[in-house]
Amino acid sequence: MPESRNAGLFARAQRSIPGGVNSPVRAFRAVGGTPRFIERAEGAYLWDADGKRYIDYIGSWGPMILGHGHPAVLEAVHKAVADGLSFGAPTEREIELAETILQLVPSAEQVRLVSSGTEAAMSALRLARGATGRSKIVKFEGCYHGHADALLVKAGSGLATFGHPTSAGVPPEVVRDTLVLPYNDVAALETTFDLHGPGIACVMIEPIAGNMNFVRAGVPFMQRLRELCTRHGALLVFDEVMTGFRVALGGAQSLYAAAIPGFAPDLSVFGKVIGGGMPLAAFAGPRSVMEQLAPLGPVYQAGTLSGNPVATACGLATLREIRKPGFFDALARTTRTLTDGLLCAAHEAGVPMAGDCEGGMFGFFFAAKLPHDYPGVMATDQQRFNRFFHAMLDHGIYLAPALYEAGFVSAAHTPADLEATLGAARAAREA
Ligand SMILES: *Cc1c(COP(=O)(O)O)cnc(C)c1O
C-alpha cells in the first residue's frame, strides 16, 4: 500500500501543533485512526490529501449550510476582499447583517457581532450578570457553550450542587457560581430555583443540544424553564450557535415559540451559519439589556476583528440564500430522507438505532430509543458507533468523528448523495 499523505501530514502536524490539530475533536481520538487532512471542498464534497472524495456531513461543524463554494457566497467574499480585509472602524455591512439577524429573530432588538461562538457565549454571560447584578449561572450537563472558563464545567455529584472544572487551568473559584443541572429535568430546575432563585443571573441552554449529538429540550421542560426564569428575574439565554439559522430560519426558538404561546428567550447566541464559514458570531437581545454594553453601559465587551468586512459579506450572502422561499422546506426534506434512510437500514440489519432531525441538522444513536439527557447519550453503544464511523469513512462518507456530535446536511446534498450514503450504511452493516 502506498504511503498515505494523510498519515504523513498527521505525523508532521504533531511535531509543531499539540495533538496535530487546532481543535481537539478533529484529532479522531474518540473513534481512533488518522484524521483526514482536507485539501479542498465543493458542494457536498471534501477531498483529502490522498485525493479521496467524501460526502461531507460535518459542514465545518455547521456553517456550510449551502454546501462548499456556493457561487453567490464566493462572489460576495471576493468582492469584499478586494475592498479591504479589515478596517477596525464601522461599516455599512455590519448594519445590514445586524438588521437581517433582527428580522429573522423577533426576540431580539439589538445584536453585537463577535468572531467566535465562544466569544459570543462568554459575552452574553457577562452581559447577563452585568444586567441583573447577580453572579450565579445555570447550565445543563451535555451542553457546550464554547470554552470560556465559567462554562467549562461538568455536573456536580448531587442535585443543585455546584460544578467542578472540566479543564485543568480553570480554578474552582471561577466556576463556584456555575450550577450544572441534568438536561430535561424539571424537578432539578425547580429545586435549583427554590434554593438559589434570587442569585441566578441567567440560565444558558442549547435548546436542541447538538453537543451531545441531537437531544431536544422537551416542550413542557422549556415552558417551565421560561416560567421560572421570568418569576425569579433570571435571563433565559438560548445558545443557538449551532441551531440558529440551521434547524429553522428563525432558529430553535421559532420552534418553541410555535409550541408555547408567547415564548421567547431573553438573550440569544449565534455563530456557525451566520458566518457562512468565516469567523463570525453574535449575541442579541432586548434593547434594554443590550444597551448595558460598552460604550453605552457598564458591561465591557470588544473585539479587534468584530464585524470583519469579509466575514460579514460571507454571512450576509449566506443568510440571503437561506431566506429564499422554500429553502428550509427542501433542506428539511433532504435531512429527513437521510435520517429515515439510516434508521431503515439499521432496522433491516436488526441493529437498534434511534434518530431525530430538524431542518438541516440530524442525529442518530445506536440505542433502542432516543436519549433525553447526557447519561442517556453515554449509555448508547459507542463501540458500534466507532465501527460504523470507520466503515462509512472507508466508503467515502464523512460523519462527525464522535458520537457526541450532531450531523449536518447542506442544500448541496443531492438525492444521489443520499443514495450513496444509505448504500454505504447498508454495506457497513454487513462489514
Ligand atoms: C460551536 C458551538 C459553540 C462555540 O463556538 P466556537 O465558534 O467554536 O467558539 C458554542 N455553543 C454551541 C452550542 C456550539 O455548537
Image (cartoon, rainbow, N blue to C red):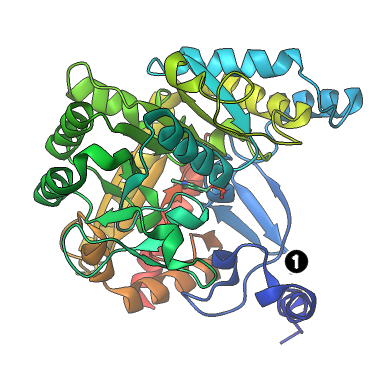
Name the one closer to the observer, 155 or 9. Answer: 155
Q: Is there any visible trace of residue 241 in the rendered image? A: no
Q: Please, is residue 217 above or below residue 346 in the view?
A: above
Q: Residue at x 86, y 29 (%)?
A: 81
Q: Quadrant of residue 79?
A: top right
Q: Residue at x 43, y 15 (%)?
A: 288
Give the percent coordinates (x, y) of residue 172.
42, 67
Residue at the limit of the structure toward the bottom, as seen here: 1
Question: Residue 299 vs residue 295: left or right?
Answer: left
Q: Residue at x 42, y 26 (%)?
A: 328
Question: Residue 53 vs residue 400: left or right?
Answer: right
Q: Residue at x 47, y 75 (%)?
A: 31
- The amino acid beneath tag 1 is Ala
Give the percent coordinates (x, y) of residue 23.
61, 62
Question: Residue 274 vs residue 136: left or right?
Answer: right
Q: Dot 1, crowdedness within 10 Å: few (<14), some or many (≥20)?
A: some
Q: Is there any visible trace of residue 430 in the rendered image? A: yes
User: Mark 1 = which residue?
Assistant: 49
Give the percent coordinates (x, y) of residue 34.
62, 77
Total numbered badges shown on the rendered structure: 1
